[in-house]
Amino acid sequence: MACFLVPAGEAVVTTIITKVVKSNEEKNASDEGRVPFSKKLSWLNNLLWGGCLLLLFEHIWHGEIVPWFPFLTAAGDPAETSIMLNEMATVGGTMAVFITSVWVVMLLVSSALEKRAPKKQTATE
């Protein structure tokens, strides 16, 4: 019903954090041949926003989201609202944790590949 709102909330937070980290990286520019952390955070943002858009489309397709207030059909009935909140906590929370776990695995693989990459030689060597 509204499970996509949990990863969407995480996506909003990580998007803001990405912008802050990117501006800090630009101030302290140092090219050490590694992928900047802001770029790695953008991977998480892409995973979260992409998943949210797909789930949003799916919920619209099944009539769970409508273009009139309260937008979520489950929010119109108090009995349905408790079911919706439970789904957000269980399914939405699980999706957010899973997406973040996939991103952590991506970070580990990226770190391993960066360690294996040949080091850049400077002109003085």
Image (tube, rainbow, N blue to C red):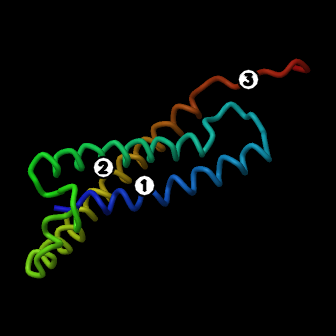
Residue denoted by label 3: 120
Local crowd size for mark 1, using a 10 Å CA cut-off: few (<14), some (14–19), many (≥20): many
Q: Is residue 49 left or right of residue 62?
A: right
Seen at 16% across and 52% down, the residue is 59
- Amino acid at the residue labelled 2: Cys
Q: Is residue 110 left or right of residue 121?
A: left
Q: CA distance from mark 2 to mark 3?
A: 39 Å
* Residue 120 coordinates in the image, percent (x, y): 73, 23
Counting residues from the N terminus, which is met first, the one under dot 2 or under dot 1? 1
Looking at the rendering, in which quadrant would you find the C terminus? top right
Q: Do tag 3 and tag 1 residues touch (Cβ < 8 Å)?
A: no
* Residue 53 coordinates in the image, percent (x, y): 30, 45
* Residue 92 coordinates in the image, percent (x, y): 25, 62
Q: Is residue 74 left or right of residue 13?
A: left
Which is more toward the observer, 69 or 6?
Answer: 69
Residue denoted by label 1: 11
Front of the two marks 3 and 1: 1
- Amino acid at the residue labelled 1: Ala
Rendered position, 112 above or below 88: above
Q: Do tag 2 and tag 1 residues touch (Cβ < 8 Å)?
A: yes
Q: CA distance from mark 2 to mark 1?
A: 9 Å
Residue 116: name its quadrant.
top right
Counting residues from the N terminus, which is met first, the one under dot 2 or under dot 3? 2
Give the label on residue 52, or none.
Answer: 2
